[in-house]
Amino acid sequence: MRQNKLLLSTLREAPAEAETRSHQLLLRAGYIRQLAAGIYTYLPLGRRVLRKLENIVREEMDRSGAQEILMPSMQPAELWKESERYEVYGKELMRLQDRHEREFVLGPTHEEVVTTLVGNEISSYRKLPVTVYQIQTKFRDERRPRSGLLRGREFLMKDAYSFDTGWDGLDQSYWTMFNAYHRIFSRCGLQFRAVHADSGAIGGEGGSHEFMALADIGEDTIVVCSACDYAANLEQAETAGAGGGSASGVAGNMPPLEKFHTPGIRTIGQLEQELGVKPEQIIKTLIYRGNGKIFAVLVRGDHEVNEIKVGKHIGAGEIALADYQSVMQAAGVESGFVGPVGLTIQDVLVDASVAEMANGISGAGETDYHFRNVVPGRDFALTYVGDFRNAAEGETCTHCGEGHLEFHLGIEIGHVFKLGTKYSEKLGASYLDSTGRSQPMIMGCYGIGISRMLAAVVEQNHDEQGIQWPAALAPYQVHILLISGKDKEQVAVAEALYEQLKQLGIETLLDDREERPGVKFKDSSLIGIPLAIVVGKAAAEGRVEFIERKTNGKEIVEIAQAVSRIREYY
């Protein structure tokens, strides 16, 4: 491609609203342009990278045995009501009506559509298992679209769905896709981890894993062990503490419960400063609302409640801290002085780390008072003990017992789920088994955010000058920079190289613009093509400058040697 014909304009400065490096660089290098908040046009360079990502995904999906289909973006709302996700998705689900006032949604995912499709097409166990996939635009009405392609309202996604006759079959389909994802992300040159994760609004009856690209601007915290291969999203990470027990064996030796005056002292920080105690000596009592009821959660002062774990325990999709009035009504005192002793709330969830405390300090259920010498199991009941907190950095890994937990930030680029019969039972996707009995299909679903992956690659591959594309994804493989279009020898060498590389099947961009050399060098570094050939004054002597973008290494070589190096690289 000749650059003077390419639809490409670079920007010296990124727009003020572009905060992440990937957003800034993709805008500045002319890969994308914003149409509206969270909605982007992909210019020729951006589309070429997307196509290469799609091709890698297709090759590995086909290799795994999945079959490609294409389903409608516009879906009847009644399907979502049948699956009971219409309300669960809330305002993020884009809704519309046709001229007949029939309600539709723009699909953020396709479980309802594909379940209906396969349920209508397959009726016998002989045609199972089957896995289908598509690459398609999805829609999500994000409250605050941000970070460019990482959090948009319209995005490109690969979603696959498996249908099996039993759980063993689902397990095989799941790990087949899990391994395919490893190959995809490895081929794209990404640094990633597969972590245990929560299934969220997709739901399901089995496990799930998220594939996280490591990045400093990641929205998700990944918990990994320093010694073994354990990795999980913070929402799902298991914490130390067996649970179900207390220090009751030594409770008889503990001092009696003591109420003491703490005027105006209500926070963990204030207790720590005024009383000289450590946060791990404090029992924190938080009042929540969820599933139509009020309940309490107890964690240590140095720990944070994990609302995903708590929500699962009480069977609520969403929980929230109770407001001032609800706390006063339920506990008889404002937040900061609520404690477990004498608490009349029926459901009190006690984190295992609290249950194992010898004694502690807590609110006394009375304004400006706290208790000391609070003994779990003696002074309050341990009816519901479990893992209700976030993992803490540095604590011992529960899987190997040797390593410690480390925290990293990551960008979710893929997610695999074991759905079970969540959708097949509600939407009637069944098959006749070998005895003629009707059975629900056992499902799995598997997504990759392709446009999000494009941004994640840039987050991991850039320097101060611009993007550094991995060879497999670069929009072009070689960038030829013609320094002077008025120098006949330079033009001849550049044209000859351009034609030779094209004949070799090397994707080449020839910068033949009438621009200053400095502009061409800056644009080349910004665009980030892996290899560049500079055709300048040395062309008269049969030599060119060979540049490798990843290392910014530069070397004057013979023209034939430059071609040979390019062929070796690819």
Image (spheres, rainbow, N blue to C red):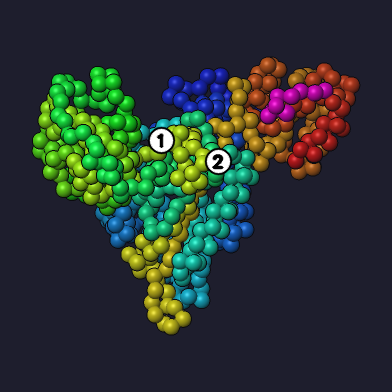
Q: Which mark is residue 201?
A: none
Q: Quadrant of the N terminus?
A: top right
Q: Which residue is mark 2?
A: 227
How much space separates mark 1 and mark 2, taking CA atoms? 16 Å
Q: Residue at x 31, y 28 (%)?
A: 279
Is residue 203 toward the left or the right of residue 196 in the image? left
Going by the numbered disc 2, the residue's amino acid type is Ala
Q: Tell me: residue 319, above or below residue 261.
A: below
Q: Residue 260 appears at what percent x and percent y?
A: 15, 25
Q: Which residues are magenta?
A: 548-556
Q: Quadrant of the C terminus?
A: top right
Q: Residue 524 appears at what percent x and percent y?
A: 66, 25
Query: Does residue 192 show up?
Result: yes
As helix, strand or loop, the secondary structure at mark 2 comes to loop
Query: Does residue 148 show up?
Result: no
Residue at the bottom extreme, as displayed? 435
Disc 2 residue crowd, few under 14, some 14–19, many 20+, Cα 10 Å: some
Name which quarter of the figure residue 264 lies in. top left
Residue at the front extreme, as displayed? 253
Label 1 with label 2: CB-CB less than 8 Å: no
Going by the numbered disc 1, the residue's amino acid type is Ala
Q: Tell me: residue 44, above or below residue 433.
A: above
